Amino acid sequence: MRILIVDDEPAMHDSYARSFASQRGEGADALDAMAADLFGDDDAADDAADVLPDFALTHCNQGLDAVAAVEAALAAGDPYSVAFIDIRMPPGIDGRETAKRIRALDGQVNLVIVTGYSDFSPIEISKVAGPADKIFYIAKPFEVAEIQQTATALAKRWEVDRELSSARALMAQQIVQLEEQGLELAANESRAIHIAMHDSLTDAPNRLFFLRALTERTKRDGLFATAMIDLDRFKLVNDTLGHLAGDALIRQIAEILQHSAPEGALVARLGGDEFGVLFDAPGEPAAEMACDRMVAACSVNLTVFGNAVQAGASAGMVVVDGAQGTDPIDVMRRADLALNDAKRQGRGMTRLFDESMDEGIRFRRRIESGLAGSIEKGELSLVYQPIVKRDTIEIVGFEALVRWNTTEYGPISPAVFIPIAEETNIIHELGDWVLTESLKVLARWPGQYVSVNFSPRQFRRTNFVGHVMESVQRAGVSPSRVQIEITETAIFDDAERAAETLYKLRQMGFRIALDDFGTGYSSLYNIRKFALDSLKIDRSFIDGMGRERESAAIVHAIIHLGHALGLEVIAEGVETAAQVQLLRIAGASHLQGYFFSRPVAEDIACGLAERRFIGEDANDGAGTIELGDGTNG
Ligand code: C2E
Ligand code: CA
Ligand code: CA
């Protein structure tokens, strides 16, 4: 380690030299050399004499020389650890000034002020050459040991400080690096998100972005418009000028839309030549005007790769209120329907969605209004499908199934109109009619029951039990000849109340069947709670029985469960002799399906009821007995 000594008296330099030389005692060097000869090892000698660190001394007589030495040492990368500085050094700068200048160059070096006078208070020197913990004082004349200890302690400290500060510098550098990497990662991530949410051709938000924004918007109150804008004759540009021209056109249109859209609007490229625009609007007229402006802006002559292109666009738009819990996909669908309408109507225009554009809604409305008058118009009828015992093929009952033959559209399946009737109140009127009609026919059958379907809504009607009982009494039939078919959904939505209703019905003597069993969510275990007579295994399982392991397993499980609970198990939708065979083995107690008979008109049902048995031989392996259906003839 290097030590700097500044003193104007040559005698002082001698005392310093002695102080550091005496560290190893007289003749130490000679001993070292002998030890090295004897043991061939330099360290042995070193170990023995190692009292002080190795110091390299620099002697200066004047302050300025010392300052220059410090500068040179720093430049050489080998700075001083300690500097001993005399205070009075005429004719040059004094010790205070020397200390100040050295400190200005080197913040680390320990300064030891060596003085016989107390001309400067320590504080004063610290002020100009601080910090105070790097300035020390020794009075002249000094002891050898004093110089040695001070030099050793300060040199060690200097070394530790240096290591610490280089470790600190390294850490600071690593922190900077980490911060830089963090920034880079964040930038990469936001770039990735940007790429995922934007269209690469136009850099506009893409469909995903649009759908997200729309979904968010549907959760907030207030009216907003969703417009879909599609270029007219885009295909022509693509086909005649090429795809690059098409791309260029898309880019120009994206820009035009961005500029002509209302403030705050989101303009996204949904794909191809289709754009979506989302914006808040006070009402339909304002939204339509805003959309018209965009469409008008698109109707311009553009130059694409030197070719003149007459651009144009059509728009479909829907305005909805976010408060109404609108489904974003449905909003898109409606805007799209409106766009289709705009295209049909002759392009270059905005069309506002209305329900007449929605085939689904139109159809529903027609069914609804048609159903309302169907009873008076005598368009409804019932057909009956036999339910037979597994072994004897004796007919124990008939399921009543409603048919609607419209004058306008011909027959419509109950699978279509029952759900619609159920969403409106028409189901009650319709259900009453079915019950009344099916009870009438009982008088014509020797003893079979009629199985009537009830929708969940009917079942949940207040005083359902009283209502059914009243109908039965009015018809003068025994409740034991009426089977009530309900589905799992009807009873599991409010299981407690349903259990009570079923219990009452059963007390009165009605038969209860759980319809479409296996398609709902009821746990097999839960059905114990309900007073039932039979389970009807859904047609889909019977259909899959020969083909899929799962279906066969479910059928077996249901039949076992039914037996365990003492219930009849009716297999629905039996169409083939093979299914009959499998169901017999599985143990179903009753069967129903085209294999035995399609649902048939009242008169044919009466004939079957009189005969009581369906001859299996009547099938002749043809699969079904054609007895004629009310509709599916
Ligand atoms: P569901 O209660 O499951 O009725 C059984 C359906 O399966 C009937 O269809 C019947 O014609 C059909 N089917 C019977 N055997 C076979 C067969 O071997 N193969 C095939 N592929 N199908 C068979 P439908 O008459 O079209 O009735 C459909 C649904 O409409 C019924 O399903 C029922 O949920 C509802 N429905 C029918 N009539 C009424 C009613 O009067 N009131 C209520 N609430 N719903 C009814
Ligand atoms: Ca049924
Ligand atoms: Ca069924």
Image: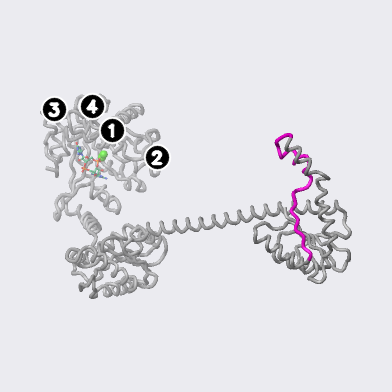
Q: Residues within 10 Å of mark 2 (few under 14, many from 20)?
A: some
Dot 2 or dot 4, earlier in sequence: 2
| Rendered residue at 71%/52% (across/down) | 159
| Rendered residue at 62%/56% (across/down) | 169
Numbered disc 4: secondary structure: helix
Q: Which residue is mark 1?
A: 551
Indicate whether 9 appears above or below 496.
below
Q: Start and end of the magenta stretch?
A: 38-61
| Rendered residue at 23%/35% (across/down) | 543
Does the rendering let one see residue 510?
A: no
Mark 4 vs 1: CB contact within 8 A: no
Q: Which residue is mark 4?
A: 582
Q: Which residue is mark 2?
A: 500
Task: Give the alpha-carbon distance from disc 3 to disc 2, as whole Å.
Answer: 41 Å
Q: Position of residue 312 (x, y in %)?
A: 23, 71
Question: Closer to the camera, 113 or 582?
Answer: 113
Numbered disc 1: secondary structure: helix
